[in-house]
Image (tube, rainbow, N blue to C red):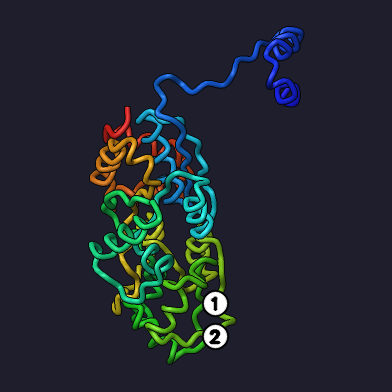
């Protein structure tokens, strides 16, 4: 039927005759009279991004948009390019990722300055960063609490000292993106002077790192400070005592024409920014990653409970 519609698109009578012969009547697609238009939402692939992506979709739908959800879309570079090329209209990005990865900033700055740099730089390419959500989804290195205590490792500097004295003794896992990011492994090796035996370093999907660390298949793993499994599995996040990692506050980044046309979008996300703190996101991440709850249902339930959407 799709081919018939395309072939006869300039002849409604022909379409009507064919449709009636099949017992079906087709009408031209129309946008709801109450719709403000289409809004395409993207996200990255890890748990927290799924939750945030579904939150954006639900908020925009509640605001009157016809939402096309591309949750999840891909890794950082894929989603970023999709926004720049207008394949999507908005997604949640992290301030530290913008400054370190997109804009190649070398120095770690305050949370406020990190946000301002992201906002100012992207304004030049027609993108708007709405005010940041309160939590900080920074990277961290994790160890099982018992092992960290037994080895006397509390900080990332302590880990470096242990690695120097005991080369090849600890198995370390990071995700694929961290392996090459400017705010990832290369900077960590330089900042902390880690001397790693390449045979002890493994790349793995973010979600699987927690399980590998829990099961003893690794001794040190890369994680996100807002992941509920850190507490659930009794891991300890090592102190970033040399302040290598920037602040990673999440913000909705949206193409400027949408905000120019409908400034009220900012009001919806201002409510989310106040409601979604570290404690809340840790709980939501845990429910999805560990209890295997549906991220869309978890996101919607939170928004309704906080009266952000109807």
SS state under label 1: strand
Does 87 appear above or below 306? Answer: below
- Where residue 216 appears, as percent x and y from the top left, is 51, 69
Query: How many numbered marks are there?
Result: 2
Nearer to us in this view, 185 or 157: 185
Q: Position of residue 253 (x, y in %)?
A: 37, 50
Q: Could you classify mark 2 by the number of other residues whose Cα lies within 10 Å: few (under 14), some (14-19), or many (20 or more)?
A: some
Query: Dot 1 corresponds to which residue?
Result: 201
Residue 167 location (% of width, % of height): 49, 89
- Secondary element type, mark 2: loop
Cα distance between the residues tagged 2 and 1: 7 Å
- Give the residue drawn at x 33%, y 41%: 259
- Give whichever of 147, 128 is nearer the camera: 128
Residue placed at 70% from the left, 16% from the top? Answer: 11
Q: Which residue is mark 2?
A: 197
Q: Are marks 2 and 1 in contact (CB under 8 Å)?
A: yes
């Amino acid at each position: 039927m799709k081919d018939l519609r395309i072939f006869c698109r300039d002849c409604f009578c022909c379409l009507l005759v064919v449709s009636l012969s099949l017992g079906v009547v087709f009408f031209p697609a129309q946008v709801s009279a109450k719709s403000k238009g289409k809004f395409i939402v993207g996200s990255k692939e890890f748990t927290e991004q799924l939750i945030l992506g579904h939150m954006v979709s639900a908020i925009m739908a509640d605001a009157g948009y016809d939402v096309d959800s591309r949750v999840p879309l891909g890794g950082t570079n894929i989603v970023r390019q999709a926004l720049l090329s207008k394949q999507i209209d908005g997604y949640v990005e992290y301030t530290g990722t913008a400054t370190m990865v997109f804009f190649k900033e070398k120095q770690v700055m305050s949370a406020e300055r990190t946000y301002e740099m992201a906002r100012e730089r992207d304004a030049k390419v027609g993108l708007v960063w709405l005010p940041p959500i309160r939590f900080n989804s920074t990277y961290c290195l994790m160890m099982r609490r018992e092992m960290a205590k037994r080895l006397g490792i509390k900080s990332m500097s302590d880990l470096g000292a242990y690695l120097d004295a005991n080369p090849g003794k600890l198995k370390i896992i990071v995700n694929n993106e961290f392996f090459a990011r400017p705010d990832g492994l290369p900077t960590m090796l330089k900042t902390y002077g880690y001397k790693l035996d390449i045979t002890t370093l493994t790349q793995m999907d973010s979600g699987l790192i927690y399980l590998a660390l829990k099961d003893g298949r690794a001794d040190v793993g890369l994680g996100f400070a807002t992941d509920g499994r850190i507490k659930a599995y009794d891991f300890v996040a090592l102190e970033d005592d040399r302040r290598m990692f920037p602040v990673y506050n999440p913000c909705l980044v949206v193409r400027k024409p949408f905000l120019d046309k409908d400034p009220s979008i900012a009001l919806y996300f201002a409510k989310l920014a106040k409601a979604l703190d570290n404690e809340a996101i840790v709980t939501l991440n845990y429910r999805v990653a560990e209890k295997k709850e549906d991220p869309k249902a978890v996101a919607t339930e939170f928004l309704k409970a906080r009266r952000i959407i109807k």
